[in-house]
Image (spheres, grey):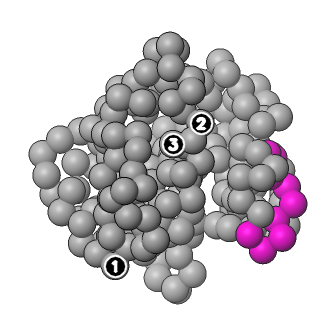
Amino acid sequence: MRVVAYEFMSLDGVVQAPGGAEEDTDGGFAHGGWSVPYFDPEVMGPVIGASMTTAEALLFGRRTWQGMAAAWPQRAGDPYADQMNAIGKYVVSRTLAEDDLTWNTTLLSGERAVADIAALRSREGRDLLIWGSASLVTTLLAEGLVDELNLMIEPILLGGGKRIFPDDGAARPLQLVNSVTAGTGVLVCTYRPVS
């Protein structure tokens, strides 16, 4: 299985709370919902839709999973929502318990997450998709466990907030394998690690 990450990202690398004001206010972040004005359904919609055609399962950090699990089941009846609700999911958490799980989800322990995800990645199968989940993506990038990084780079500077790139001084060359520009100025870029 490949681990494939998707992120809405500001031009200065921020991925925090792209969808709404209350999504993630950690650190006093006050720009929640910043990506909404830049969404181009004609360009970005097909990218998001196509992601599910190669997906075996979804992988989330706890905060992103809780937000998604609260929102998506109510959207049943739309083909994309039905697919999102039906597909298997994994959530990495140190605080959730099995009794907390809903939405067709399997719990991965925060203490064993890297090993468990590496084991999933070694299985035969389609893609393991990550949406958002900044802390998890940072860890997986640092461990070399992200096979593809899809960035929707939006023309806004946020001046601070959560980012996904490891800050450990290690060089990690990437190859741009695809890019398209949305009418809203968003660069949709697909990168893969250089072998």
Q: Quadrant of residue 113?
A: bottom left
Q: Quadrant of residue 44?
A: top right
From the top left corner, tell me how far across and down residue 135 is, in percent: 53, 68
Mark 3: few, some, or many residues within 10 Å (few <14, many ≥20)?
A: some
> Label 1 vs label 3: CA separation?
22 Å
Q: Please name the residue shown 87% across and 60% down the image.
A: 30
From the top left corner, tell me how far across and down residue 136 is, in percent: 47, 65
* Callout 2 amino acid: Ala
From the top left corner, tell me how far across and down residue 120 is, in percent: 21, 56
Residue under pointer 3: 69
Viewer-proximal residue among 101 and 123: 101
Q: Main secondary structure of the magenta part?
A: loop
Residue under pointer 2: 71
Kindly check if marks 2 and 3 are in contact, taking CB atoms under 8 A apart as contact.
Answer: yes
* Callout 1 amino acid: Glu
Label 3: state its secondary structure.
Answer: helix
Viewer-proximal residue among 190 and 54: 54
Checking the image for residue 111, the label placed there is 1
Mark 2: few, some, or many residues within 10 Å (few <14, many ≥20)?
A: few
Write the start and end of the magenta stretch as one range: 26-34
Q: How many marks?
A: 3
Is residue 47 shown to the viewer in this render? no
Q: Residue furthest front?
A: 99
Q: Please name the residue shown 57% across and 59% down the image.
A: 63
Relative to 125, residue 133 above or below: below
Viewer-proximal residue among 183 and 70: 70
Mark 1 / mark 3, whichever is N-terminal? 3
